[in-house]
Amino acid sequence: MPPKKARIKDIAILAGVSIGTVDRVLHERGEVAEKTREKVMRIAKDLDYSPNFIARALKTKKRLNLVSLLPEPTEDNPFWIKHPQGMERAINELDPFPVNLSQITFDLLDENDFQKKADRVLNLHPDGIILAPIFKAESISFCEKLSKRNIPFVFVDGFIKETKFLAYIGEDIFQSGRVAGQLTDMITPVKKDILVINLARNIQNVHHLNNRTQGFLSYFPESGKNKGNKLNISIPNTASEKIKQEVDRIFHKNPDIGTIFITGSKSYKIADYFVSEGIHSVNLIGYDLLEKNVAYLKSGIIKFLIGQRPEEQTYKGVKKLFDYLSLNKVPERIEYLPIDVVTSENVNFFL
Amino acid sequence: MPPKKARIKDIAILAGVSIGTVDRVLHERGEVAEKTREKVMRIAKDLDYSPNFIARALKTKKRLNLVSLLPEPTEDNPFWIKHPQGMERAINELDPFPVNLSQITFDLLDENDFQKKADRVLNLHPDGIILAPIFKAESISFCEKLSKRNIPFVFVDGFIKETKFLAYIGEDIFQSGRVAGQLTDMITPVKKDILVINLARNIQNVHHLNNRTQGFLSYFPESGKNKGNKLNISIPNTASEKIKQEVDRIFHKNPDIGTIFITGSKSYKIADYFVSEGIHSVNLIGYDLLEKNVAYLKSGIIKFLIGQRPEEQTYKGVKKLFDYLSLNKVPERIEYLPIDVVTSENVNFFL
DNA sequence: CTGAAAGCGCTTACAG
DNA sequence: CTGAAAGCGCTTACAG
């Protein structure tokens, strides 16, 4: 049994003051004699006082005002549709506690739009922020404004270490590349070649995807058994004609490719190409449980998808902000989520 | 904005009675005129009343009394050490809400001990139970007692469909066998044989493990490319001499085994044998992130471990009981957790 | 600078 | 059968 929790009243009695005074001290609302303040602080510490946040929530009319700033999910980039669901689940779970969430989205391909939306976020006077730092320079300047105003922010999807983020929840990007490398090594004949494809329309993502590529390639010299060539191309324009053109070319030069690793979430585009060309003998490994990817996983064209739990990223983001702002709990700063290895046989449990 | 929540007071005003009377109606504490009762009920329904459980928690002195009945983790069976951690995490998260948890454990090899402990659980007058139904017959009789007393119970690790369980949180056992089958198929040369080993000391587990074996074997005729023999043995005595004896024998008769699948959590025992015999060419696939298994996974002797999230099973079990008992939320009855595919490269994120 | 009081929405005992 | 009141631990405005 834990010892009975101290209340404000207990502190007040021991300090020989009223509970109003104790409250003023604890909330640093000033207007308290220094001597009284010290006495109250000491007693609070002695009693190991922590507020009963049920009582606080019952009384307080103030709602916690959280704001998310994430990319708008689009036809071309449906990866971002899962993120809102995680936040909504967190809000529901917190239900009787007064928490609001405003979701602001920006165009994944437009830095200016990001800046505009960042300003809008600021105008909402948020208590805390959930942010995907897609555009590095613009994100840094936004984060500086937040820090100046003492508004805590958590990153999802990636983090910028130069900023004062409260927490990051997401993938260990390099390591997820290594996992892909290991799986590739397991299913690729020793003498076959391996191709890495970067399908990134916007240059900003390159850093992110590069990291995965690094991790992927690092696996082979250290731990792999594959002896084939490791090829690496980028296809910035993801229109299907362009993809056909580029992949045709590389297949022509390298007919012995055993596995293709796609570093982003658009492996279905390569799968589309395989289907239209009637290619069956090359393995595909990609990222993220988009509907189209999952369909190709189930039909066997994609062998593995790596999942990064987008829903859990934002769910935990909201929870950490709540814990920090309402319960004064300082969260683990970097929380890497497990790297999920998803196949046609276990995919249903991840949807 | 949701419409403002109705309070007991609102109902009282509309019904022209006092809040005490409303409370008596809502809690079915009787002593209310039938006409009053009906009126209050109707108004409560009209206003879509639901209690503010923050206020309730603040006032109520009654603690929720949860009890778990799980196997004792042992040297020989450390699988069960993760389960308490999940429950403790749930209790911590619920913290200011008044929830107690008593953990009762039983001997995994002794039905009589289970019965004795089940009686002890009953004597604790629990409000809700978390149960691993290892012994089928004894569990059924215990569950009947619980149902008679209106005590809700959730299963982890497995479920008995003949009982009135509130919820099950755990693996889809058959499907997890299929996942193992698929992974085996991917890493085993087409012509090599495949061996399934059942390392089960107590006969009770056979049902469980059989299910995995069924799932495993079902993969090959439907979707596999492996053409080798599928062998299947049980080794009830897991002493290392016995294992050596049995595996030696089967290797002698079947020298072309490419992969061994161990249906339970003791794959490290086969790995021990591999190490002492200097065997390197056979793949090992097993279950559960026990320390010894993880060590062999990292050193490359075990290729895959399948994880069943023991910690999350009990975490969710506690949460569901709390939601049900305190918030009147009826949970999803069967919640299959994802089947985790764990390799040396992603294992650290699962520990 | 400090205290006394009201009130958040509920539960509980008591008086009638 | 029903109502009025106290109190859970906190916050907030007001009086002095």
Image (tube, coloured by chain):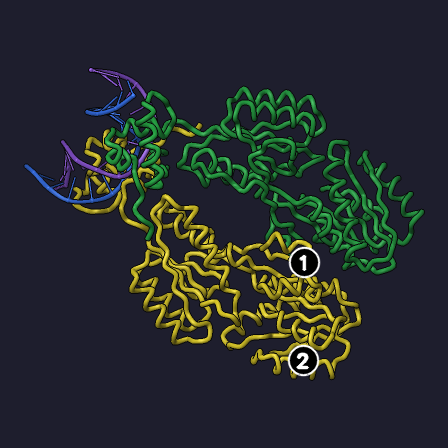
Chain colours: A green, B yellow, C blue, D purple
Tag 2 residue: B247
Q: What number is the disc on residue B42?
A: none
Hey, what amino acid is under mark 1?
A: Thr
For mark 2, give the secondary structure: helix
The residue under the point 43% across, 46% down is: B93
Q: Is residue B119 above or below residue A18?
A: below
Residue D9 figure quarter: top left
Q: Position of residue B228 (x, y in %)?
A: 76, 73
Q: Nearer the viewer, residue B160 or B93?
A: B93
Identify the subunit bearing mark 1. B
* Cα–Cα gap, marks 1 and 2: 25 Å
Q: Nearer the viewer, residue A182 or B34?
A: A182
Tag 1 residue: B343
Hey, what amino acid is under mark 2?
A: Val
A272 sits to left or right of A348: right
The residue under the point 64% across, 24% down is: A141
Disc 1 vs disc 2: Cβ atoms closer than 8 Å?
no
The residue under the point 77% across, 44% down is: A213
For mark 1, give the secondary structure: loop
First along the sequence among labels 1 and 2 = 2
Q: Position of residue A98 (x, y in %)?
A: 41, 32
The residue under the point 32% across, 41% down is: A47
Q: Position of residue B277 (x, y in %)?
A: 71, 77
Q: Is residue A257 above or below residue A139?
A: below
